[in-house]
Image (cartoon, rainbow, N blue to C red):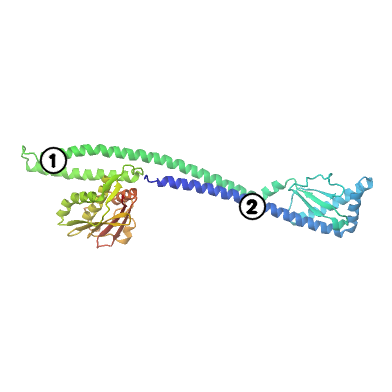
Amino acid sequence: MKKINKHIILFFSSFVFLLLLLFIQVNTLIETAETEKRHFAQSVKLSLNLAAEQISKDRQMCSNVKSCLLNKESKHVIELQKKEWAKVDSIIKRNLDLYNIDLAYKFEIINNNFDIHKSKFDTSSEICFAESLDIDLQQAGVDLRVRFPEKRKFIIKRISTMFVSSILLIILLTASFITTLKLYLKEKNIAEKTRDFVNNMTHEFKTPIANIGFANHRIQNSKDIVLPEKLVKYTEIIEKEKSKLQNQVNEILNVAYVEDYSNGNNFEKIDIQNIINEAVESIKPIIAEKNGTIQYQNQADLTAIEGNSLHLLNSITNILDNAYKYSNGKLKIDIKTYNKGQNIIVEIEDNGIGICSEDQKFIFDKYYRVPTGNIHNIKGFGIGLTYVKAVINQHFGKIELKSSEGNGCNFKISLPVNT
């Protein structure tokens, strides 16, 4: 099963969150507009109600308006209507001002019994408001109707600040996301090219290093040549420096592995016991130099896993090598394996100098090196345990560290078994 690139998950999640934010902003704007519409309608209704009350108090106006509605053809009525309608207009405007509605409007007074087909307004329009004047004029079916042709502009103006800021925010977030994505893709492309260059360079180094080692080995072990004492020392220096250079090349390759998220494609069924045994055999000679011991005890019934044998071997060897480097006195390393659920647990414990709790927080961080006090001969790039964790994660496992200063380290690796 191929592990999903966490960067892809991150950007996909960011894109989904951006879409969600856009949806929330648009939905909020719609709800705000609807709220403003309801508030506007309520304010107009209240202002018209007040206007109707004020009209009803002027009995002469009520009588004149009623006469105008019933006798529309008379010239006297037409002049009277202009006068009374102007009064009604001033009452409407005054009451609209009370509710801060400074908006152009048109009004008419309709007698529904006679003028149902003569109204200037569309009675089904949402921008037409009506207040009954039946009681005021003592005439059934009379309505005061007000229309606001620019109501939509008014609503937009009321929410313009929020609308503009929301649009700007949406545009800025979208532009920021697109810019970030472009920069990421650019940097990712550069990183991939750099990683490929490092891989190619280090692989090119490995061949001459191997040839140097081979030639030096032949010189040191040749039966036909008796080497002078100085030449023997030179060959020893060559061997030592070759080993250092080989270790540094391996460290650089480890860095490249940590940076590469596509290296889980070449897994095969392997036995973790064989990996551990090989790692133990490779480290035994240098541990013997410190008069140390290393023991491996297997208590697991299920030891088969899916993985990359080379990187798992390097990972376990790295842990063992750290135990050798960070030790004082007689070194002791105990390795044991056992099953827990559908996993195999590999525990590697040593009696070295240990790691304090503060350093344990950063122990798997790239390029982090634990301060070694008065031990000054430890070389490296600080990538070893980062590489180990990357390999374990690539195998869908976990690694934990338990340690205290002066009491050694206990690394616990959990890997899923192949059943």
Which type of secondary structure does the marked residue at label 1 adopt? helix
Mark linked to residue 227 = none
Check disc 1 and report the residue beneath it.
Answer: 217
Is there any visible trace of residue 3 in the rendered image?
yes
Q: Is residue 299 above or below residue 104?
A: below
327 left or right of 394 in image? left
Residue 276 percent across, percent down from the top left: 23, 51
* Dot 2 alpha-carbon crowd within 10 angstroms: few under 14, some 14 to 19, many 20 or more: some
Is there any visible trace of residue 165 in the rendered image?
no
Quadrant of the image for the N terminus?
A: top left
Residue at coordinates 34% horizontally, 57% vertically from top-left?
361
Residue 176 percent across, percent down from the top left: 50, 45
Count of numbered circles in the view: 2
220 left or right of 308 in image? left
Residue at coordinates 44% horizontally, 41% vertically from top-left?
183
Mark linked to residue 32 = 2
Q: Earlier in the sequence, mark 2 or mark 1?
A: 2
Residue at coordinates 7% horizontally, 43% vertically from top-left?
229
Amino acid carrying mark 2 in the image: Thr
Amino acid carrying mark 1 in the image: His
